[in-house]
Image: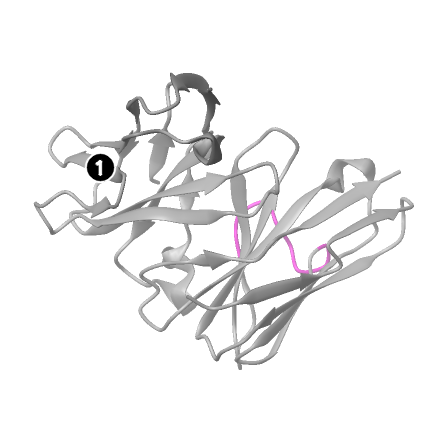
């Protein structure tokens, strides 16, 4: 079974600064997807960024970028120019590329999350 | 991405009762998933719900406790049966297309069982 580990329960950053959230995972599969979701106090899960394992290029979405190291099974999220609205719980998640019965392998396996505080 | 709504947004229930949570999507989707997020915890998948077939439950979750319906490609329900305080959680539905590359989540249902 796949596992996802986020070793930083809490992080803080000054507004306009850069912060990196860490995530490692364990899998025997060669093809998979990795995600970062944010969950603000409203509790809505919002997709931040997605990375396909077969792509060597790191994904970027505006101020958000990842450092994907497949051999090291590491998938960190960098937030540049941090804003007050970035304050949230951030979850790293893994998804197999193989469907399984009825798509059940498409389930997301989440880490425990990192609570990010942005200080003005 | 799809627009997903859940009803109710929150509820307070008495132990021993049941609550049915609805998940509605504004477009047809192949796969729907139901997750549970216990207080201060991460999300755990309860089951995968596909239209026209029985839901596939994860280890530790059973149909008698969490019956699921998926009558069409835009709607699903999750029932939490014979509730106990341990069922107090946020329940979230998510949806994905046929290849399931990305899951999008509904706003969640916050359940408190007394």
Residue found at x 33% / y 39%? A2
Residue found at x 38% / y 71%? B97
Q: Main secondary structure of the magenta part?
A: loop
Of all chains, the one bearing label 1 is A
Give the x, y percent position of residue A61: 26, 47
Count all numbered tags in the image, as a single digit. 1
Magenta segment range?
A: B57-65
Quadrant where the image shows the N terminus of chain A: top left
Asked where in the image residue B101 lies, by quadrant, the reply is bottom left
Give the x, y percent position of residue B49: 53, 67
Q: Considering depth in this image, is A34 or B78 the residue closer to the camera?
A: A34
Dot 1, how many residues are within 10 Å of its Cα: few (below 14), some (14-19), or many (20+)?
many
Q: Label 1, on which residue?
A: A66
Give the x, y percent position of residue A85: 47, 36
Q: Considering depth in this image, is A102 or A87 the residue closer to the camera?
A: A87
Asked where in the image residue B84 lies, by quadrant, the reply is top right
Residue found at x 37% / y 58%? A106
Q: Tell me if B81 is positioned left or right of A65 in this view.
A: right
Q: Secondary structure at mark 1?
A: strand
Asked where in the image residue A8 lies, by quadrant, the reply is top left
Q: Tell me if A67 is positioned left or right of B100 in this view.
A: left
Give the x, y percent position of residue B110: 72, 46
Residue B63 forms part of the magenta stretch: yes
Q: Say if A45 sits above or below A5 in the image.
A: below
């Amino acid at each position: 079974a796949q596992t996802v580990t986020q070793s930083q329960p809490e992080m803080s950053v000054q507004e306009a600064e850069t912060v990196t959230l860490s995530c490692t995972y364990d899998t025997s599969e060669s093809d998979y997807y990795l995600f970062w979701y944010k969950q603000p106090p409203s509790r809505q899960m919002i997709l931040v960024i997605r990375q396909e394992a077969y792509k060597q290029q790191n994904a970027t979405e505006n101020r958000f970028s990842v450092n994907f190291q497949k051999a090291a099974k590491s998938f960190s999220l960098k937030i540049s120019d941090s804003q007050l609205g970035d304050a949230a719980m951030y979850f790293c998640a893994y998804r197999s590329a193989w469907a399984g019965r009825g798509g059940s392998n498409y389930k997301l396996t989440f880490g425990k999350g990192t609570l990010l505080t942005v200080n003005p | 991405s799809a627009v997903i709504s859940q009803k109710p947004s929150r509820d307070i229930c008495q132990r021993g009762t049941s609550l049915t949570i609805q998940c509605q999507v504004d477009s047809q989707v192949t796969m729907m998933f139901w997750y549970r997020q216990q207080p201060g915890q991460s999300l755990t998948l309860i089951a995968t719900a596909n239209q026209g077939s029985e839901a596939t439950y994860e280890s530790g979750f059973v149909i008698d406790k969490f019956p699921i319906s998926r009558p069409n490609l835009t709607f699903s329900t999750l029932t939490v049966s014979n509730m106990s305080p341990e069922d107090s959680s946020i329940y979230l539905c998510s949806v994905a297309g046929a290849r399931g590359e990305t899951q999008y989540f509904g706003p969640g249902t916050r359940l408190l069982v007394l």
